[in-house]
């Protein structure tokens, strides 16, 4: 390309001379090889029919104001069947280790799901989480890169959290933010009706489905 550029500008040097000068000036730098991209097969987003069969998880970014403005990350975990917000908590940062600690707490009171749907963030594709999933016998269902709509249920929860909580006030510190998040979670799970649940709350929906399950088993 440089040789033809010079020719177009009227220089008559042949390609051997151009190449010799190019090497003498150490301009022959090789581009670093591109890392192979992640390739994920598409899995249609269908809400499971059973409670606790599948979860979805994602992060939401926000910040707190005060003496020092601080960026925070919020971990969101939901049950895809009942739309219940299982865990919503803000941290200054969330590593794969911290994510596993949160998942262990949810599994302790909820039980492990058959799968967890997530994107391709570094915390989600880490070896630590892969080992945890194998130990818990949980399938990690990754969406295709750049396709957040394939995790649409948790994206809807993220939007609701932002519109109904995060955008309503300035938070002076992490504790104040988490207090507001917990108050919102209570309203979301126990008071706010959901159209896709027949205008029931997630908690009410789960209670009704448990009663139906046990009545079928008893019959």
Image (tube, rainbow, N blue to C red):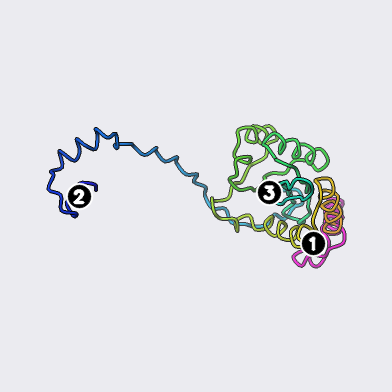
Q: Residue at x 65, y 48 (%)?
A: 117
Which circle marks residue 6 in the picture? 2
Q: Quadrant of the C terminus?
A: bottom right
User: Was residue 212 drawn as part of the magenta stretch in this picture?
Assistant: yes
Mark 1–mark 3 Cα distance, whole angstroms, equals 19 Å
**How dense is the environment of label 3, judged by Cα within 10 Å: few (below 14), some, or many (20 and up)?**
many
Q: Earlier in the sequence, mark 3 or mark 2?
A: 2
**How dense is the environment of label 2, judged by Cα within 10 Å: few (below 14), some, or many (20 and up)?**
some
Which circle marks residue 102 in the picture? none
Q: Earlier in the sequence, mark 1 or mark 2?
A: 2
Residue 161 versus residue 55: which sits nearer the camera?
Answer: 161
Where residue 173 sits: x, y (%)? Answer: 81, 47
Mark 1–mark 2 Cα distance, whole angstroms, equals 60 Å
Q: Secondary structure at mark 1?
A: helix
Residue 26 versus residue 177: which sits nearer the camera?
Answer: 26
| Magenta extent | 190-219
Residue 194 versus residue 11: which sits nearer the camera?
Answer: 11
Which circle marks residue 59 in the picture? 3
Q: Closer to the camera: disc 1 or disc 2?
A: 2
Tell me: residue 115, above or below residue 204. Answer: above
Where residue 197 sits: x, y (%)? Answer: 78, 63
Residue position marked by numbered label 1 in the rendering: 168
Where residue 67 sits: x, y (%)? Answer: 78, 46
């Amino acid at each position: 390309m440089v040789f033809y550029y010079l020719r177009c500008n009227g220089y008559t040097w042949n390609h051997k001379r151009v190449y010799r000068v190019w090497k003498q000036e150490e301009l022959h730098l090789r581009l670093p090889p591109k890392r192979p991209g992640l390739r994920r097969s598409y899995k249609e987003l269908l809400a499971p029919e059973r409670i606790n069969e599948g979860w979805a998880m994602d992060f939401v970014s926000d910040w707190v104001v005060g003496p020092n403005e601080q960026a925070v990350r919020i971990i969101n975990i939901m049950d895809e069947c009942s739309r219940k917000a299982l865990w919503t908590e803000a941290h200054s940062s969330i590593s794969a280790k911290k994510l596993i600690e949160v998942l262990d707490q949810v599994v302790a009171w909820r039980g492990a799901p058959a799968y967890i749907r997530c994107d391709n963030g570094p915390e989600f594709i880490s070896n630590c989480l892969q080992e945890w999933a194998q130990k818990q016998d949980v399938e990690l269902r990754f969406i295709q890169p750049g396709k957040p709509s394939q995790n649409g249920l948790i994206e809807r929860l993220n939007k609701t959290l932002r519109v109904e909580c995060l955008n309503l006030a300035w938070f002076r510190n992490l504790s104040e933010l988490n207090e507001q998040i917990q108050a919102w979670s209570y309203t979301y799970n126990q008071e706010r009706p959901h159209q896709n649940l027949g205008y029931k709350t997630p908690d009410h929906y789960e209670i009704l489905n448990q009663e139906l399950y046990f009545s079928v088993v008893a019959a």
